[in-house]
Image (cartoon, coloured by chain):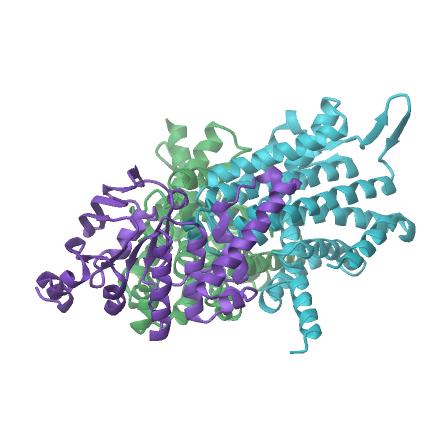
Amino acid sequence: MDTLLQHLLNGLILGGTYALLGIGLTLIFGIMNVVNFAHGEFYTLGAYGAFLFLTVLRADFFVALLGAVALGVVGGAVCERVLLRPLTGESIDTTMLVMIGVWIAMQNGELLAWGGVAKSIAHPFPQAPLVLGPVSVAPLRLFVFGAALVLIVASHLLIRRTRLGKAMRATFQDRETAALMGVDIHTIHTVTFAFGSGLAAAGGALLGPVFVVSPSMGDLAALKAFCVVILGGLGNLAGATLGGLILGIAEELGAGYVSSGYRDAIGFIMIILVLLLRPSGLFARAERVG
Amino acid sequence: MSLEVRDLTVQFGGVAALGGVSFAVAPGRITSLIGPNGAGKTTAFNVITGFLAADRGEVRYEGVPLTGLRPSRVARRGVVRTFQKTNVFPQVSVFENAMIGLHLRGRAGLWSVILRGRRVREEEAELAARAGEILGFVGLAHRRHETASALPYGEQRLLELAIALAARPRLLLLDEPASGMNPPEKTALMGLIQRVREQGVTIFLVEHDMRLVMGISDEVIVLDHGQVIAQGPPAEIQRHPEVIQAYLGGG
Amino acid sequence: MSRIGGAALAAVLLAAPVWIWSPYHLHILIMAGIFAVLALSLNLLLGYTGQLSLGHAAFFGIGAYTSALLTLRLGWPVWPAFAAAAALAGLAGYGIGRVSLKLRGAYFVLVTISFAGVTQLVSVNWMDLTNGPLGLPGVPAPALAVPGLFRLSFVGKTAYYYLVLAVAAGAYFLCHRLVRSRIGRAFIALRENEALAESVGVEGTRYLVLAVVVSAALAGAAGSLYAHYTRFVSPEVFLFSYTVTMAIMVVAGGKGTLAGPVVGAVLFTALPEVLREATSWQWQMVLYGVLLILIVFFLPKGIVPTVAAWLRERRAPS
């Protein structure tokens, strides 16, 4: 039972970051209709950004995290403005191909800049795990979970309580009408992409110290993000949050009780199963397309 | 009866786009479906041709149920529709568009296509001849090599009609075929529709242009807020008090 | 392409081992041929039905492993193993098609990526079957034997070149017949306007599945060719960079045409070799990424259609 609780806790913590990735992607995918295959690269960018701030600029750990997120936001804004805005109105395949190009260029650029050897990020938390009853958790992971939670709540608040969020929701539901009502679609797109990329970078910066930083770390992260989007339904923030947690827990349970070699396959299999059985996502309301 | 619709119900959220609609379309005649915006006309078309599932009700064509069939199966039964917004195959030539429409008239499967024996070659030649005939019928023969997306709007609508005709329909559902056309184009279209009917095709159309509707229809069905409020010959419908009220927005 | 042009090209290709002076360049041509089959297969999906598969390396890998395992472990001759490789890859394609059903666009891409991911994990983890990361060395080369009379072994580059040329020509021929037929028109209808296609009787799912099956089988055939040429198969065949390279070949060469993928295959097999002298492969990949973006912006139709249109403009002085 204790092991089960431990797995659940680990899964919850991992799931928090998956939720971060998923929220960013579902917003981009849902509002902009762009298949952002470069999402994982912003995750990687966040990790390397934290590394850069920490080692090269010798910044404080928490400043480095903020710096990494800022890097993601700015990078996302630039990417959208330069590459995606000129393609507004193009088919989804065209933007997909462009994002694949960005994916390839960014990942191999990182490989060139930092080399293929994994880097580790130092953190100020004690190594000794905290014991909370039947489970134990490393302080770092607790911090990661807490930070992810804060960001998730902030995202929800942004979307539900602010005017910007309202404009984003309007654009998601009916782009043409939103434009007619005075919403500046171009700005919304840039903000969405920057925000989503910032969340991905946050995920990378937070998980960087937990695992190691390597140029290809974004590939799996991207796939898991897509899995979360599919689980939760396109554009569904709450769904993405729940989906992220479910994926995290499923992976931990699978790795613990079935096999750790196939751990990453769980995400793939879930994608296939959900698309097969309930293409609109586990939590999407059944809606008709007329 | 050619097409029978019974108690058709479609709900979108809490709104009934179609609330238990029943009507029949007689064979070999031109029947029009009219009604104010949002009355449920295109929804009815979508359900009949398999693009939308109804919550309740039944659609039968020549006695055979169509409900639940996917659109390609419905087309196989001889029921073909056009769409409200212009729909062609944009990046291929007008001729290729017609050839695609002729899909059901061909038989070639994977292996015969690869071997390309005499039968396949003859079939292709026949289809090409038919495509030329159909394009000539709608008046697009001179455009056969143009890319479909390059055609002016009115000609794209004619191409739409040609594609639908190519599928050899026995019942043709036209969704606002004249929308966006200028008066001479509409007159030409009316003539075309009548010539199609002369070939034995049953026509069921949705239209907003009353002159066109009253001009060519044998029968008119009026829909309002998802219900049939009148059905009869044009002259009767024009005098029908409920119809007049529905269009003037009374109530 | 005109008959004279075609005949000239055929003559040049058939005489290649004569006028190509180094085995290294012949090797490039062989790899170009294998990739041409791959590019043609991906083009069938992307160029004609309009669906993008980013998991084609999986079909390639399934073909390679099937062929290698049948010849190594069960002692099959290469020819039936080749056929089995294509068949098994085609079967996997059928599975993907049935799973995908109504899925299009990004969702279809995700299914293909997931399938490739799972396949790669299996090849790494199922040690008993695939020998995991160590791979399968010593895959036999094909041989043509009439007992008692002669035995021709396709070990040398020259012999293998003709084999690849034959398979590539066969793949081209198959695609040509397919796309210029009723079935090809159904594919194009899917790509251009699926709802309209359905309304005139073209059953979308059925033709998408057919396209995936044929496409997968061709990729599997390419995998088998690869396995018996390099004579070593490892989970590296599932590398995403193969899929990326394939996609670039199709998009840069010109999707929706038959010559495009072939031109793309030759170009992007030769290009890395040229660049290899100059730069590292990471720079190549960065270049690939940038190139993909540039092509989408500036040469959206790809090289072959753009050149063809340019030639047509010059010939027609209107």
Q: Colour of chain A?
A: green
Q: Residue at x 59, y 39 (%)?
A: B110
**Quarter-of-image position of residue C7:** bottom right
The answer to whether residue C208 is left or right of residue B27 is: right
Vertical relation: C124 (above or below) B130: above
Position in image of residue C223 (x %, y %) = 69, 39
- Which chain is depicted cyan? C
Looking at this view, name the residue that lies furthest to the front.
Answer: B198
Position in image of residue B47 (x %, y %) = 29, 48
Vertical relation: C166 (above or below) A156: above
> Which one is in front, B185 or C31?
B185
The answer to whether residue C205 is left or right of residue B30 is: right
Q: Quadrant of the C terminus of chain B?
A: bottom left
Q: Residue at x 32, y 56 (%)?
A: A156
Q: Residue at x 65, y 60 (%)?
A: C252
> Which one is in front, C316 or A149?
C316
- Which chain is depicted purple? B
The answer to whether residue A47 is left or right of residue A245 is: right
The answer to whether residue C301 is left or right of residue C278 is: left
Vertical relation: A31 (above or below) A219: below
